[in-house]
Image: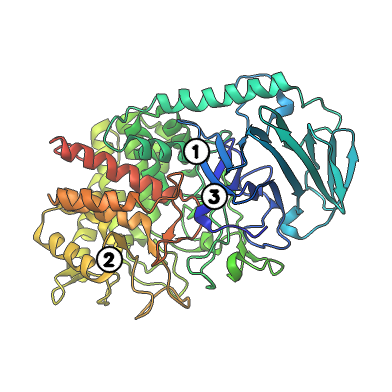
Amino acid sequence: MAAQPIENYGVIGNMRSIALVSMEGSIDFFCFPNFDSPTVFAALLDNEQGGTFCIQAELENLRTKQLYLPDTNVLLTRFLSDSGVAEITDFMPILAGQKGEIYAHQIIRMVRVIKGEIQFRVRCAPRFNYMRNGHTARAEGDCVHFEPDCAGCPEMTLHATVPLTLQGNDAAATFALKAGETATFIFGEADPDAEVLDAEAIENHFHQTSQYWRDWIGRSNYSGRWREMVNRSALLLKLLCSQEYGSLIAAPTFGLPERIGGERNWDYRYTWLRDSAFSLYAFMRLGFVEEAQAFTNWLRDRLHDDAEHGPLQVMYRINGDQELDETILENFQGYQGSRPVRIGNAASDQLQLDIYGELMDAIYLSNKYGDAISHDDWKGVGRILEWLSKNWNRPDEGIWEVRGGRKHFLHSRLMCWVAFDRAIRLGEKRSLAGPYAQWFATRDAIHDDIFTNFWDESQKAFVQYEGSNALDASALLMPLMRFISPVDPRWLSTLDAIEKTLTEDSLVYRYDTVGDSIDGLRGREGSFTACSFWFIECLARSHRLDKARLLFDKMLGYANHLGLYSEQLGSSGQHLGNFPQAFTHLALISAATYLDRAASGKAGSTWR
């Protein structure tokens, strides 16, 4: 079975790992035991050898449909034909505060026939350690046990309520079910002798997991016009949160291309500081205080870290580790032939000065809506700003993590301004001691630098980097970060220039990758979906509300069948880049909540 297009997948998870489930009933991507662990299934990146867990219904004129149980991350895949109807219920149990440890970190797949008598074929073909190591399979009773031949790879077991056979080192099954009958498969790290096929226990975990998600999303205080899409975005973001550490990964996948056949293929299974302020804003705005506080605690630990190029590193593993060495997996064919397939991320070693603004904005937000910052953490802030006061004027690789050489990027300058602005606001609000004269002077110097060196009078627009005439969609964050009024004439002309140069209807490109491109990579890429939502919010803030609402509704139409978005969209609407992408859903929540306030006449309250 060939891997499906990116947009044909749903996701299930337990806030430790995530699996991608296709509309055809195959799990084609799964890292275990953690988000950033090696793959067990990766057919999405290599159709032939990557590994899959597929359940197929043998029906003529088969149609499929996929949906989430309302307000949950429990996924249903339906097989439909005139002769029969069946469905797979996929979920990973949420066991917080519950007994049943043997079900922890399992994938549970329940097959049920609703109409007719249907023949099924099952194949569970794990490929361990990014397909770099083999394994041995042995059948024992109602399970098949998989023993990888690599040190550190967990042994895994497939349990089933139907007979399993071995096909080489894969598990297989062929069986028939009549209407009302079910078959259950449980895959994960488990003792092959454990009694996990208890029908009552499985049913209880299904109901407990469903109820967990319903209770969680029920705490959302969003009741606006786009409740279904905002709630789905929130449920996804919760899946991307580490229950153990409180951090949030950018996406659960790696190697999915920003252009089919191109080289823009990255690993996003890590936590970017850049996402921090957006994440805290989204959780706080929706009323999820616990998640915001957990992420804040994780961020505060980073205040006392040190990285090679400054006090902070661009991204971290979920536990805060800084080692993210980039490696090319030569044995992978890549999604639709898109190579190289990379794991790790060399951008972690880059200098990206904007992260200091995002960190300070997150700290400011957490203090505005949560507990006051501690004395030691405030000292950590002072240490970081002391370094930044001496380094804000350096060229860097910027928000888009370019590999074509450092430049003086507008967005990096903007966020350096944010870093000092938020520290001043926070310190004065909390009556905290600090070198305010120096911070004021630095903030104002950055402000003047932006208006002096990044304004292009001929275009009436702020440009991508000093000395260029290129535009960059990251400039859309200028009014959102309260650097400039959303109705300032200079901003309005910049917004018009971005619309003329970088947009196609509701789709917004990051920058021109064909002309004088700064990223050091070949080929085009898709439109960047988060930028589309930034553009929409900027339109709304500049009082172009009707246009903003029209484009927002159009962008909702680009979501996949489950309301999920990848990082980018191709010219024909196909999903590109890693999937699903936190940054996109964070931007959607921000745009939706502002549009609601604006449409209700309550937009006078500021974003920050």
The image quadrant where one finds the N terminus is bottom right
Residue nearest the viewer, comparing 596 with 429: 596
Whether residue 88 sits left or right of residue 173 in the image: it is left
Q: Earlier in the sequence, mark 2 or mark 1?
A: 1
Q: Which mark is residue 503?
A: 2
Q: Which residue is mark 1?
A: 298
Q: Residue furthest left?
A: 489
Mark 2 vs mark 1: in front:
2
Whether residue 98 sits left or right of residue 212 in the image: it is right
Looking at the picture, how far across and down is residue 347, in whole percent?
A: 51, 62
Q: Quadrant of residue 426?
A: top left
Q: CA distance from mark 3 to mark 2?
A: 27 Å
Whether residue 480 sits left or right of residue 173 in the image: it is left
Q: CA distance from mark 2 to mark 1?
A: 36 Å
The amino acid at mark 2 is Thr
Residue at 27 percent of width and 66 percent of height = 503
The image quadrant where one finds the C terminus is top left
Q: Secondary structure at mark 1?
A: helix
Q: Is residue 442 visible?
A: no
Q: Residues within 10 Å of mark 3 (few under 14, many from 20)?
A: many
Whether residue 396 sits left or right of residue 449 in the image: it is right
Looking at the picture, how far across and down is residue 526, in whole percent?
A: 41, 66
The amino acid at mark 3 is Tyr
Q: Which residue is mark 3?
A: 9
Mark 3 vs mark 2: in front:
3
Confirm or deny contact between disc 1 and disc 3 (CB under 8 A).
no
Residue nearest the viewer, comparing 411 with 96: 96
Q: Earlier in the sequence, mark 1 or mark 3?
A: 3
Looking at the picture, how far across and down is residue 460, in whole percent?
A: 14, 70
Q: Residues within 10 Å of mark 1 (few under 14, many from 20)?
A: some
